[in-house]
Amino acid sequence: MISENEGLKREIGVWGLASNSINIIIGAGIFILPAIVAERLGYSGIWPYLICGILMILIMLCFAEIGTKITLTGGAYSYIEVAFGKYAGFLTTNIFIFGASVMANAAVANGLADTLSYFFPAFKIQWIRILFFALTFGVLAFYNIRGIRNAIIIVKFNTIIKLIPLLMIAMFGWFFISPSRATIASVNPLSDIGEMSLILLFAFVGAETAMNVSGEIKDPEKTIPRGIMLSVFLVVILYITIQLTVFGILGDSIVKFKNAPLAEAANIMFGSVGIMIVVIGASFSMFGNISGMVLNMPRVLYAAARDGVIIPKELARIHPVFQTPHISIICYAAMGFIFASVGEFKQLAMLSSASYLIIYFGVVLAVIKFRITKSVDKNGSYRIPGGFVVPVVSAFAIIWVLSNLPLNEIKGMVIFIAFLTAVFFLFRAFSKKL
């Protein structure tokens, strides 16, 4: 087992870890994706949810095993870096920041604008959306630079509000379902299900982020597998319930409400009051997701620059008055604004999901490596039942889902990884000459 006495107090238990994980997972995706999935698959949209749910459970089992053996703060980065070295750690850091996180923020910002357009059609106009993105990322950067206390207040305020409309639809929507719509049609082509699974995965990722606080989890050998599995299981149940309920209420007309399918379902259920609850809840959820990422991810940029992980040292500068990593915050917010302005929700969500899957693939391979070498085994650490079945199946499942990425996006990811590889080895070669 690899761990460090990082000076952190281990106070997070099972429900604390599960709550943190659920809060991270449930963001913008579930408010937008039901219509995108239903448009392609109809009521058969349940299959991508099941695929994503099973895949995430398998992947989180791998996280649970390796997370009880390597209890360092840093989550996936630490696991991959310990297993495969500095190069793999460098790729993980940059794919996570620039691929998964920035793309996710940009996608959520577009989802927020789409949701607000339900009440304010002006948000469909491109220049107004760009102005809105500038204000959103600009205000969050401003508050983050002025101090972390203000940023945390914003994040906490959004935590509970976003769950209210989801639980409302999940609990009471069954009374409004039309039985004629609640039937699963013929099975769609596997390629359609695979593509929707890749997009839908955007709504499931994030559980592993809760393990970035591994250095503060008490009794990690038991808490990590229980907390992570509990959170993923509850989210899968909630998501499937919402998909079935919303399509059962709206039927084929769901494609008319792509920007806010849950709001229209709530309109049928509770009238204008229901719409207000869902739109407000969705808006707070999406804004909270963005604010949380703008709070956390610049600190990763700052730490990477501080530790010399081939990132400009300017990003490690601290504001002389507010003692915050202001350059990293400005840089991260600017990237979020740029990608939000040039992309759309579906495309950005797909790219973010692909980035996450690449990181997950690295963690699964790390589990396989440590199983073979037994270099971090410890009595009492969690071990997935069934030998190599779960990590091997997870690896092949990830490859299958990634194979559904459009060709242009595959080329873009390959070029991105090739660029990072060139930067790493050129920097290392230059450093040796100094």
Image (cartoon, rainbow, N blue to C red):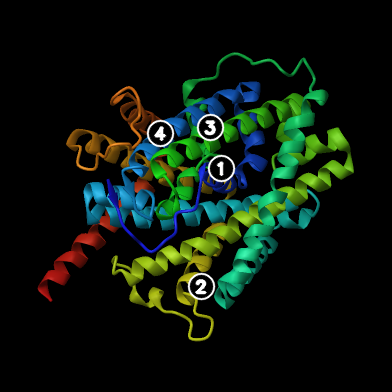
Asked if the residues shown at circle 3 and circle 2 are in contact, with their CB atoms under 8 angstroms apart, the answer is no
Which label belongs to residue 114? Answer: none
The residue pinned by badge 1 equals: 15
Rounded to the nearest angstrom, the CA distance separating label 2 from label 4 is 36 Å
Write the residue at 72% across / 32% down.
170
Q: Where residue 212 sits: x, y (%)?
A: 43, 53
Q: Which residue is mark 2?
A: 330
| Tag 3 secondary structure | helix
The foreground one among 75 and 290 is: 75
Q: Residue placed farthest to the left in the image?
A: 433
Residue 182 location (% of width, % of height) = 72, 18
Label 1 vs 2, first from the N-terminus: 1
Q: CA distance from mark 4 to mark 3?
A: 23 Å
Sequence order check, earlier mark of 2 and 4: 4
Q: Residue at x 39, y 75 (%)?
A: 316
Q: Is residue 255 visible?
A: yes
Q: Earlier in the sequence, mark 1 or mark 4?
A: 1
Q: Which residue is mark 3?
A: 196
**Residue placed most toward the observer, 207 or 298:** 207
Where, quadrant-wise, is the C terminus in this rendering? Answer: bottom left
Q: Amino acid at mark 3?
A: Met
Vertical placement of 167 versus 115: above or below? above
Q: Secondary structure at mark 2?
A: helix
Q: Which residue is mark 4?
A: 61
Which tag is nearer the camera, tag 2 or tag 4?
4
Q: Quadrant of residue 354?
A: top left
Three-letter amino acid code at disc 2?
Ile
Distance between the alpha carbons at the discs numbered 1 and 2? 34 Å
| First of labels 3, 2 by sequence position | 3
- In the image, is residue 433 above or below residue 377? below
Looking at the rendered image, the disc whose residue lies closer to the viewer, 1 or 4, is 1
Viewer-side label of 1, 2: 1
